[in-house]
Image (cartoon, rainbow, N blue to C red):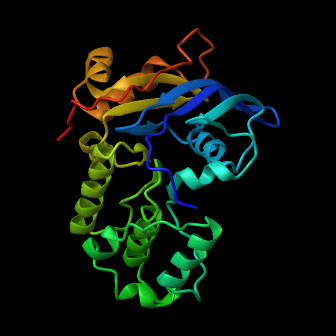
């Protein structure tokens, strides 16, 4: 299959998920638009991982819908070919080389297009792709992980701690790639504990707390809403404002609009 090059909106409506007695996602409504890098933030247990797993089809929500472009995520796997995923800790088979992993993923995706090997060269891992994964250093594994995630030119990219373990030059190279893909109209979601990095990368912020959307909007609107000038300060203010056990009527919805004219240096 050749992955669609058309931009794709990721739409989440009324998403709820409960594990036993714990409400992990509570009526989450979000739109992630093409041409936009969105930072998904929240403390541990906020629901970020569950939300991403629902999008990836790894967890079924109890209520609500997820749409990727015209496709509804309903347990069928075909839509996943429209998503590029970079996990935080790539658990790739240690006996396979990078090229063998790429070939296996090509087969799983029934991919017949021209692969994007830009990161293989810019991260200087072409020779390392011939080595078994178990012999690679942690940083090199992360570079191969990135190269495999971007290989298919997917309309939607989900990046979980993408620069973890990378040296400064490699991290800068990867961030340049992320920005370039935004300019090509990709819908990009990023999670990271490095708030300074996200501040320099993201166009939009979604903040989850207790499974609810407490903020969704541009960085400028976040500064205005919290009277803060840094992402760290703004998130701390949102956490102070929305106590973890608060049962008030805070907003549970948010629309993340594309901002093609906005550049965050």
Asked if residue 244 shows in the view, the reply is: no
Q: Residue at x 26, y 68 (%)?
A: 170
**How many numbered discs, if any?**
0
- Residue 53 in percent (x, y) is at 64, 47
**Is 224 displayed left or right of 39 in the figure?**
left
Q: Is residue 224 above or below residue 119?
A: above
Is 202 or 138 nearer to us in this picture?
202
**Is 207 displayed left or right of 237 in the figure?**
right
Q: Residue at x 23, y 60 (%)?
A: 172
Q: Is residue 139 above or below residue 40?
A: below
- Residue 179 in percent (x, y) is at 27, 49
Is 244 or 173 nearer to us in this picture?
173
Location of the C terminus by quadrant is top left
Location of the N terminus by quadrant is bottom right
- Residue 240 in percent (x, y) is at 43, 22
**Is 1 displayed left or right of 220 in the figure?**
right
Q: Residue at x 40, y 48 (%)?
A: 193
Q: Residue at x 43, y 57 (%)?
A: 153
- Residue 8 in percent (x, y) is at 48, 39
Q: Is residue 240 above or below residue 205?
A: above
The extreme top residue here reads 249
Asked if residue 241 shows in the view, the reply is: yes
The extreme left residue here reads 265
Is 25 or 261 nearer to us in this picture?
261
């Amino acid at each position: 299959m050749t992955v669609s090059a058309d931009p794709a909106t990721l739409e989440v409506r009324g998403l709820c998920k409960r594990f036993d007695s714990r409400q992990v996602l509570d009526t989450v409504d979000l739109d992630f638009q093409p041409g936009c890098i969105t930072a998904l933030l929240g403390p541990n247990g906020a629901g970020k991982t569950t939300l991403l797993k629902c999008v990836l089809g790894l967890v079924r929500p109890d209520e609500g819908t997820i749409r990727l472009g015209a496709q509804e995520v309903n347990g069928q796997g075909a839509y996943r070919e429209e998503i590029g995923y970079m996990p935080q800790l790539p658990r790739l088979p240690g006996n396979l080389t990078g090229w063998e992993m790429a070939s296996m993923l090509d087969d799983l995706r029934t991919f017949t297009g021209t692969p994007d090997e830009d990161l293989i060269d810019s991260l200087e891992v072409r020779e390392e792709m011939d080595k078994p994964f178990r012999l690679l250093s942690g940083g090199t594994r992360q570079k191969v992980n990135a190269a495999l995630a971007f290989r298919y030119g997917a309309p939607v990219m989900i990046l979980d701690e993408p620069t973890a373990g990378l040296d400064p030059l490699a991290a800068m190279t990867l961030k340049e790639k992320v920005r370039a893909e935004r300019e090509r109209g990709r819908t990009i979601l990023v999670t990271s504990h490095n708030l300074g990095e996200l501040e320099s990368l993201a166009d939009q912020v979604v903040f989850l707390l207790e499974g609810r959307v407490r903020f969704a909007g541009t960085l400028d609107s976040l500064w205005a809403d919290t009277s803060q000038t840094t992402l760290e300060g703004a998130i701390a203010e949102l956490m102070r404002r929305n106590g973890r056990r608060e049962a008030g009527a805070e907003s549970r919805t948010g629309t993340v609009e594309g901002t093609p004219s906005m550049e965050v240096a």
